[in-house]
Amino acid sequence: MRSLLFVMTALSVIAMAFWAYRENYATQQALGNVEDLRSEIGAARDRLSILRAEWAYLNRPDRLLDLADLNFDRLQLLPLQADQFGIVEQIAYPPVNLGSIDEVVEVSNQEASQ
């Protein structure tokens, strides 16, 4: 009986060692994947900052004004002026027609009536 207990204990120790060995390598692989993802995120942030800088450079007001002047024949773009804007009170909103309420609507709670 004692030898069976020793054999079972030895087999369980071997099984636990094998499991720990596999978990160690799985953990190392997961950590490697995390490092790869972090480096990809860093590269994506660098690309995004470069794209934002390029967008700011391309949308400079003086550059856009020059492009609008250069393509005036095709686009017919004019600069905005203060007299082109109106006042909110000048907007004609459609009248609100609620109609008349002729019918009576009964509202009741079925649980209260039971």
Image (cartoon, helix red, strand yellow):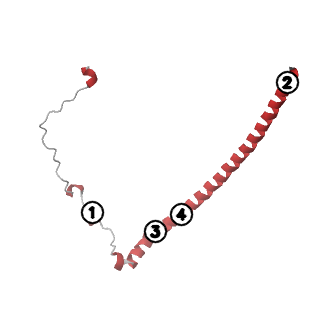
Horizontal side, residue 15 vs residue 88: left or right: right
How far is the residue under mark 2 from the one under mark 4? Answer: 70 Å
Q: Which residue is mark 1?
A: 85
Mark 4 vs mark 3, CA separation in Å: 14 Å
- Dot 2 corresponds to which residue? 4
Mark 2 or 4: the one toward you: 2
Label 2, label 1: how many angstroms apart (C-alpha)?
95 Å
Counting from the top left corner in percent of width and height, residue 37 is at 64, 52
Q: Amino acid at mark 3?
A: Arg
> Mark 4 or mark 3: which comes first in sequence?
4
What percent of the width, then of the height, locates residue 39?
A: 65, 55
Tell me, for residue 51, which label it has, or none.
4
> Are the residues at dot 3 and dot 2 in contact (C-beta closer than 8 Å)?
no
Mark 4: which secondary structure? Answer: helix
Distance from Cα at disc 3 to Cα at disc 2 = 83 Å
Q: Position of residue 81 (x, y in %)?
A: 30, 67
Q: Nearer the viewer, mark 2 or mark 1?
A: 2
What residue does disc 3 label? 60
Q: Nearer the viewer, mark 1 or mark 4?
A: 4
Is 41 left, or right, of 13 in this rendering? Answer: left
Q: Are marks 2 and 1 in contact (CB under 8 Å)?
A: no
Identified at 58% across, 61% down, the residue is: 47
Mark 2, Cα crowd under 10 Å, few <14 / some 14-19 / many 20+, is: few
Q: Amino acid at mark 2?
A: Leu
